[in-house]
Amino acid sequence: MSTPFYVSPQQAMADRAEYARKGIARGRSLVVLQYADGIVFVGENPSRALHKFSEIYDRIGFAAAGKYNEYENLRIGGVRYADLRGYTYDRDDVTARGLANVYAQTLGTIFSSAAEKPYEVELVVAEVGTEPEGDQIYRLPHDGSIVDEHGSVAVGGNAEQISTFLDQRHRDGMSLAEALKLAVQALSREANGNEREIPADRLEVAVLDRTRPQQRKFKRIVGRQLARLLEAEAAASTPTDAPSDAEDGESSDTPTATTDAKGTKGTTDTTDSGGDVE
């Protein structure tokens, strides 16, 4: 009988990690950002039915990059865990940290098992608090480790380049439109340094909005609402005209009201006779 081929445990784990990373990198990137009123999820997704972002529980959202069938199984398992725990104990007992621990155990077990291939997924679990200081964002790579993130996080595709871009430009207290613009700029950057345009109909956007009166804080931003946010930020970034002379206390070109000898009001045009009247 032939001797089985030997591979050291370190090499086996390295090969499995490289396999998973390559699978995740083939997917499109997504970003998760904190803004003044909550947490926003932004990703490029041409599909209207296969979502990258989903609601897990009242204040908890889920984002994933990689193979859809694998992270969809994890999402369903997370929903079942949250529903069971909230029903058995209390709704406040369902937290992003507890859910991240469950996902970490599942991913770690699969990654270390030689009987099956590692999952080609990278997850983000986020929970919005009543105040910005209470927001929680956890990133879970393919090996089941947990990374506590603050401010912004990117996964999938060229996540390292996007994360560097976000770290340099993200700030606390951004409005939703500002955070959305920053996320789209980050996703538009390619690995070679070029930028491309991502139309609104290829964006998937969702938020955990702490200002919503409902107990469930997750909602999707689509259609006209998404277009208005993108247009609002584009208009805000457009340079405005210089203030008029009237604002500086000087005479303006607008007609001024006068009163003739009979007491009736007329108008006197103060523009030059040869100038163009707007």
Image (tube, grey):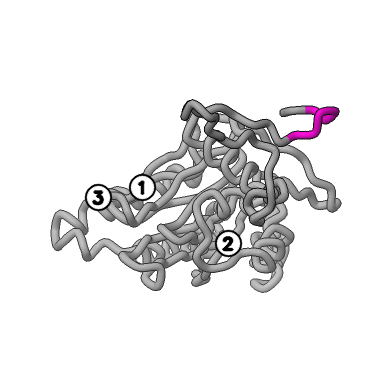
The x, y position of residue 243, in whole percent, is 68, 51
Look at mark 1 in the image and give the residue it sits on.
218
Q: Residue at x 22, y 65 (%)?
A: 93
Which callout, 1 or 3, points at the residue further toward the start of the chain?
Answer: 3
The x, y position of residue 204, in whole percent, is 53, 39
Q: What amino acid is labelled 1 in the image?
A: Phe
Magenta span includes 61: no
Q: Nearer the viewer, residue 208 or 72?
A: 208
Quadrant in which residue 133 is drawn: bottom left
Mark 2 and 3 residues: CB-CB less than 8 Å, in contact?
Answer: no
Q: Quadrant of the N terminus?
A: bottom right
Chief secondary structure of the magenta span?
loop
Q: Residue at x 79, y 45 (%)?
A: 195
Q: Secondary structure at mark 3?
A: loop
- Residue 29 visible to the viewer: no
Look at mark 2 in the image and give the residue it sits on.
153
Q: Nearer the viewer, residue 58 or 73?
A: 58
CA distance separating discs 2 and 3: 27 Å
